[in-house]
Amino acid sequence: MGFTKSVMITFLSNLLLFFLSIVNTLILSRVLGPAGKGVVDVANNFLSFAIIILGMGFASSNIFFLGKKKENAHGIFGNNILIAILGIVVLVPFYFIQNHWHFKFLQGITNLQMLAILVTVPLITFKSAMINVLLGLQDIVEYNRINIVDKVLSLVLLAGFLLIAVSPTAAILSILVGTVLICVWQVYIFVIGRRITPKLDSALLKAMLGYGLKAQTGNIIQRLNYRLDVFIVNYFLPIGQVGIYGIAVVLGETLWGVTGSMATIIFPIASSATDKKEMSTFTNQITRVSFAIIIIFSILIGLFGKIFIILFFGPAFVAASGALLWLLPGISIFSVSNILASYLAGAGLLEKNIYASIVSGIVTVILDIYLIPRIGINGASIATSLSYTVCTLMTIWFYIQDTQARWQDILILKGSDIAQIRAFIVNKINKQ
């Protein structure tokens, strides 16, 4: 399948996923209110960190090693099962530690909710890793299909569980049930549909750990940049503020739908690319085109975000509009980093992403701790925007060093780009 078609399929899928995420957030906001939604946001945040930490970077390793050799699929399947099981060794003692100490950054989470979250972790780790196996096989259609089914199922289960009991616990249990069902479907796809049987491959496991741990370091730090502010907001402010801030984050990160679609496809292509100059020229063009599109959408979200929040989420969440405005600059520029970081990872330069993530992670922690107690969720947004900007500037620098590209080639839209876009649209119209 060609790049343009793959990106279009992934982009349209991301638009649908965005719509489903908004509906999910809308249901949580309207049914549970700021405080109840805040509890679910903290739970989801914990899950996202657990996936990154306990996944050992295998989500990236799956793509990288399948890009090198498709026959690795059997060993990759088995090794992913092993990693998911080993995560339980860490989770069991964590439950008892949390039960005793009641960490403040997890305040608002009951023991039952924490138990449900911890049971979900190894399952969702396996689910996330195996979805990336499809990406490594460059089966873009199946990759997007399972993502869409996952989101639709999550939405249906959320609505069903909240009809039974209006509580954050019901929402968290719906995540657990949905994860179990998707994992079962994935096993069916690989074992029955593709005849891929899991086996342990110690040599491959060692190689995957070597690559994955480097990827994991960068991913953990990057996840800190994405989501640490949620825990810090929960630590310093009432949990209802977490729910309000979550609205700003969800709406702001919709901008990544464009670059996320392209970054998703670039990683496996860069992993198997043989012509470096052609790959960098290709990456330059899609980065500057994406950045221009992001700027336009960012302005639109900034203009109409407050009206949208009040209309769909209710007046109780209006404070999210201010936080959204402070988030937009950083999220916009970080869209560039999304693409370039995927190129660097696919080219085997994971350490460059790690360096950028470390520096921006330090910026996040320092500014969050200083700003959030003083100006609330707007402080979290400012810290995030500055952190994203630092990360992007470093990523651009590393990319330029590797490819000899100019910053103008990456960020400034060219007349030839507009001409190609126009020709593409005209061609599509003429074919109808």
Image: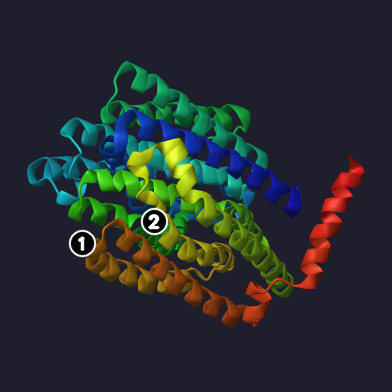
Residue 144 seen by the camera: yes
Secondary structure of residue under mark 1: helix
**Residue 141 picture location, percent across and down:** 67, 39
270 vs 198, nearest the viewer: 270
Residue 75 seen by the camera: no
Check disc 2 and give the amino acid type.
Gly
Which residue shows up at 20% across the image and 52% down it?
A: 237
Residue at far top of view: 164
Mark nearer the N terminus (2 vs 1): 2
Residues packed near mark 1 inside 10 Å, few (<14), some (14 to 19) or many (20 plus):
some
**Residue 276 picture location, percent across and down:** 69, 73
Secondary structure of residue under mark 2: helix
264 vs 299, nearest the viewer: 299
- Would you name the residue on which mark 2 appears? 322
Q: Is residue 58 above or below residue 341?
A: above
40 relative position to 286: left or right? left
- Would you name the residue on which mark 1 appears? 373
Which residue shows up at 54% across the image and 27% down it?
A: 188
Q: How is the protein colored in the picture? A: rainbow
**Residue 420 picture location, percent across and down:** 82, 62
88 vs 362, nearest the viewer: 362
Which residue shows up at 28% across the image and 64% down it?
A: 368
Quadrant in which residue 146 is drawn: top right
374 relative position to 429: left or right? left
**Residue 282 picture location, percent across and down:** 72, 67
- Nearer the observer, disc 2 or disc 1? 2
Where's the C terminus, which quadrant? top right
Check disc 1 and give the amino acid type.
Pro
342 vs 326, nearest the viewer: 326
Residues packed near mark 2 inside 10 Å, few (<14), some (14 to 19) or many (20 plus):
some
Residue at far right of view: 430
